[in-house]
Structure formats: structure tokens, C-alpha cells
Amino acid sequence: MEVETLIWKYALVNAYTHKGKANPKAVIGKVLGENPELRPRAKEIIPLVNEIVEKVNALSIEEQEKRLHEIYPEFFEEKKTKREERKGLPPLPKAEKGKVVTRFAPNPDGAFHLGNARAAILSHEYARLYDGKFILRFDDTDPKVKRPEPIFYEWIKEDLEWLGFKIDEIHIASDRLEIYYNYAEKLIKMGKAYVCTCKPEKFRELRDKGIACPHRDEPVEVQLERWRKMLNGEYKEGEAVVRIKTDLSHPNPAVRDWPALRIIDNPNHPRTGNKYRVWPLYNFASAIDDHELGVTHIFRGQEHAENETRQRYVYDYFGWEYPVTVHHGRLSIEGVILSKSKTRKGIEEGKYLGWDDPRLGTIRALRRRGIRPEAIRELIIEVGLKRSDTTVSWDNLAAINRRIVEPIANRYFFVADPVPMYIEGAKEFTAEIPLHPDYPERGVRKLKFEPGKPVYVSRDDMELFKPGNFVRLKDLFNVEILEVSEDSIKARFHSVDYEIARENRWRMVHWVTEGKPCEVLVPEGDELLVRNGLLEADADVKVDDIVQFERFGFVRIDEVKDGKVRAIFAHK
């Protein structure tokens, strides 16, 4: 490979991996570091590198990628191979083909978000990997603090199916209360559980000192009588709790005689109304269901390690084998809200548009923004089973999504904050532009320029429109800027040939003639910006399409109504 082509290769690779901007020092390092025979020619090569890097940085990202494909197609094959090597999940301990049963147990008190998705996707991927079973179990037995809402049962199921999940069984904890009662009574009869009627603050005082509650060792008959009073309404909320007997000297006070079932007066549960007053807490219901449903492997956050310690007491008392537990850290995404409570508060205050507001990290919000399910799955699998907490940047997710949507997204011109440009000396001209440069079989869009009528360019490009400057109207022709005001631009036709613009390094801008009104919602951290402009008049877009607005970014079409288009910005 000749020296100039070699420099182009390294410059394009560096630009491609750094958002379109190559670093000349990094390119020089690569050229001379990986080709030591060129070091004696360093004085000659360094100016050449600087010149080529400048040319590369003047190209659009799309043009850089196209040139890189031409010069060094192996780069993309190598990236694909490395990515596929990273994708694999490690073997699952004690796993046999056809015998793995996993579950995901969300609380339907809010929309499913990216943080929840880690346990869900790992559970599903391993179930499929071992030809096993994946169970969706709704953990909805807290009608007071984490109150379930009917819509979220449906949304969570929809979100999982959109992510590509095959759900083998669905179970709802609030439908299984009689099962929990049965096991609670068994434990009381075995002397492994008791009904505590201490005031909460008194119990905590005894527990923290490692002293037994006065009710702990009372006869089974007395415990069963109290249990019946809990069920028939003789105790009110807060007056009686079923506790599992544990080690009172356990170093973690939270493990000592932990609560299994409590009373909730007037629960008004969305599924069972006020039929039941005694409700299991998470650790008891989860422990019983994991056994009853035959779960073999549990994927849970590191913060739930204490819950496993509690639940193992129940398993030991019944002589059951505890499932294999795989702990992982929390997953968060920079600058994106995942907290259900913060999301709910923001919605109630009118700050967010709803659970699918594109600023949020719910699966519905990511979907609305144009993130593909394959991208979310790939991100989670790439993070894998790390025990440490992981914060991913939006750029990580965007890079994966970009690779997925780039081949399917048709191209269109969108001009934000349009400014009319009047061009003298140009003849009628029709630009035929491919819907996708790599797939000519998809056809072309036709944009017609008519003398006397303006083209519209984006106010974002105003710094390029200075008298005496030359620019290229992409896929149309080159013009010289004559006059510029706040409200319009005057220009003069120069030439049609793209090579003239390239040789002179004239900047390229996009444009439309008569366009249809288009609004793009752009999430910026906690803000939602609105960019109004014009989209190509004949753009054939429909709701849910992922398209690329050239030089603007990838968007998902959110609404097409009364001749107006609304889109949500995904990423560059």
C-alpha cells in the first residue's frame, strides 16, 4: 500500500472511531508505529498526514465511512468479528440443557426501564441458551407502598415481547395468596415462624440487641390462634406480623427474625380488591414461588444479596435446594432518569410528557426514541455479569443502535429553522438522490430547483454563509454567497460539478425547496428541545419509521397528521 493511501486508511479509521474527527498526532503515531520502515521519512510524512487529516475532517461521517469501505473494507469485518467474540455469555453454573428455569419478577408499579432490563435480558438469554423455560412473575403484593397499577401489567408484557422475549409462563403473585398462607401455617406448626404483636419500635430495640421477642417461643397453639386472628380481621394494620425465626446473633440485624406477612387494611388491590388483608412481603412470596415454579437460576442485583440470606432460612426449614444465584451490579445510563419514583413525580408535576417521554430510560421511551430492541439486548449482553455497578454512556447505546439502523434508514433532508436562499444565474434542475447510498434498488427522491423560487437552508449553517464564501448545496450545485441578512441569503450559481467543491474544500449543506412542516423533539439531558423546520415535501414517511435526516441525525417518526410530521431525535 503506497504511503498516501496508508495515511488515508489510518486517518479514516481514527475519524470513524472518534465521531468524525481524526487526530493528526494519533494518525502519525499509527503510521510510524506500525510501519517502522517509514520512520526515516518522518519529516516528509508528518506534513502529508496533517494535510490528509484536514481533508478527512472536512468530509461528512457518511463520506468518511464510504471512503473507508473503499480503502480498507477489512476494518469492518474485523470490527464485526471482535463484536461477535464479545457477545458470548459465560457458561451458567450447574446448568443442564432443557432443565434451566429462570424468572423475571417486576413490580407493576411503574414502566419497565433499562435498569430492570439487565436481570430480565440475562434471565431470558440463558433460558434460551440452555433450551429452558423463562417465567414472568409479577411481584404485586405491596398494595400500599409499591402500589401496582393495571396498565403496567400489560406494558411490561408488551415491552418484553418487543425486546424479543418468548415468555413461557406468566404468574401473578396476588393470585397466589392462598399458597403463601398454606406455607406460612406450615412454618408456624413447625415452630419455625411465629406471630409477633410487639409494637414495631419495641421489636427493633430487641432485635438490635439480639434479644428474642416475648412472642417468639410461645406455644404453637397460641401462634396459630394469632394467625387466625390476622386472617379474620381481629388485628388491625400494624398490630401483628408473621416472622421467620433466624439467628438472633446474626451480624446483620435486618436478617434477624425477618417479617414474612403483614396486615394491610383496605388494600383495594387492583386485582383482588379488599378480599385479602394479610399480604406476604417480597422475601417470603419470592422464596415460595421460586420453589413452587421450579426456578433453577436467579439473576439479581448485588443489592439483593441480603434477601438471599433471608430466603435461605425458608429453604432450609423445608429441606429445599436453593436456586443458583447470579449477582450483578446496577446498570445506569449517563444523564437518563431510571428511578420510578422520580419519573412518577416528574409526570405528576407536568415535567415529563408521560412514561414514554424521550428523556427517560423506560423501555417505552427508548422505543419511542428509535432505539431498536436488538441494541438494548446487545448492550446488556456486552456488559454481562459484572458484579460492580456499571454506568454506560448514551454514546455506547447510540453506537450499537446506529450500526443496526444505518442499513435500514432511508435518507431525507430536514432543514431546521429554515432561511430562504435566493440564487441567481441557475437554471431549472432536478436532483435525484438515492434513498440510501448503499442500496440503489430502493430508488431515489427527486428535489426540484426552479429559478426565481428560493431554496431553504438551516440557520444552523449561517456561519458558512458569508459574502464571498462558496458552498455546495448537497446533490444540487455550488453557489457563491453574495449577501446575507437575518431573514434571507442571496447567492449566485457557480457550477454543478461536485469535484470542484471537493478540490476547493467548500462546505456542503442540505436544503429543501417546498417542504412539509416538521417538528423534531430533541432530548438534551433533562431538557426537551423542539426544532421546527421543513422536511422534503415528498418524503414518504410513516409512524415508527427510523430514518436519517442528513447532517442532522437518525430519528423515529412519531406522528404524521394534517400534512405535518413530528419526529423524535435518536442520535447522530
Image (cartoon, rainbow, N blue to C red):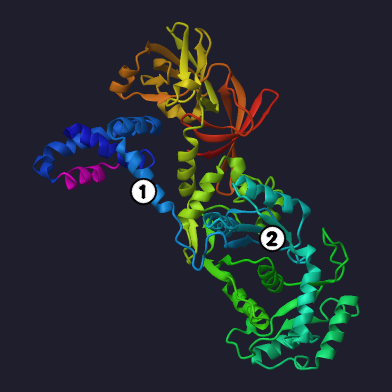
Quadrant for the N terminus, please.
top left
Q: Is residue 277 above or below residue 148?
A: below
- What secondary structure is marked by label 1? helix
Amino acid type at circle 2 is Arg
Residue closest to the far left: 40
Residue 46 position in % (x across, y down): 17, 39
* Dot 1 or dot 2, earlier in sequence: 1
Q: Is residue 165 above or below residue 416?
A: below
* Residue name at image x 65 percent, y 88 percent: 208
- What secondary structure is marked by label 2? strand
Residue 428 position in % (x across, y down): 47, 6
Q: Main secondary structure of the magenta part?
A: helix
Query: Would you say the residues marked 1 and 2 are in contact, meaning their CB atoms lie under 8 Å apart?
Result: no
Residue 95 left/right relative to 314:
left
Amino acid type at circle 1 is Lys
Residue 342 left/right relative to 130:
right
Image quadrant where residue 141 sits: bottom right
Name the foreground residue: 460 vs 196.
196
Name the foreground residue: 214 vs 502.
214
Circle 1 residue: 82
Residue 93 is tagged as none
Circle 2 residue: 137
Residue 511 position in % (x across, y down): 49, 21
Q: Is residue 398 above or below residue 308?
A: above
Label 1 to label 2, Cα distance in Å? Answer: 36 Å
Please say whether residue 349 is visible from this viewpoint.
no
**Residue numbers of the magenta segment:** 22-35
Residue 468 within the magenta-colored segment of the rendering: no
Q: Residues within 10 Å of mark 1 (few under 14, many from 20)?
A: few
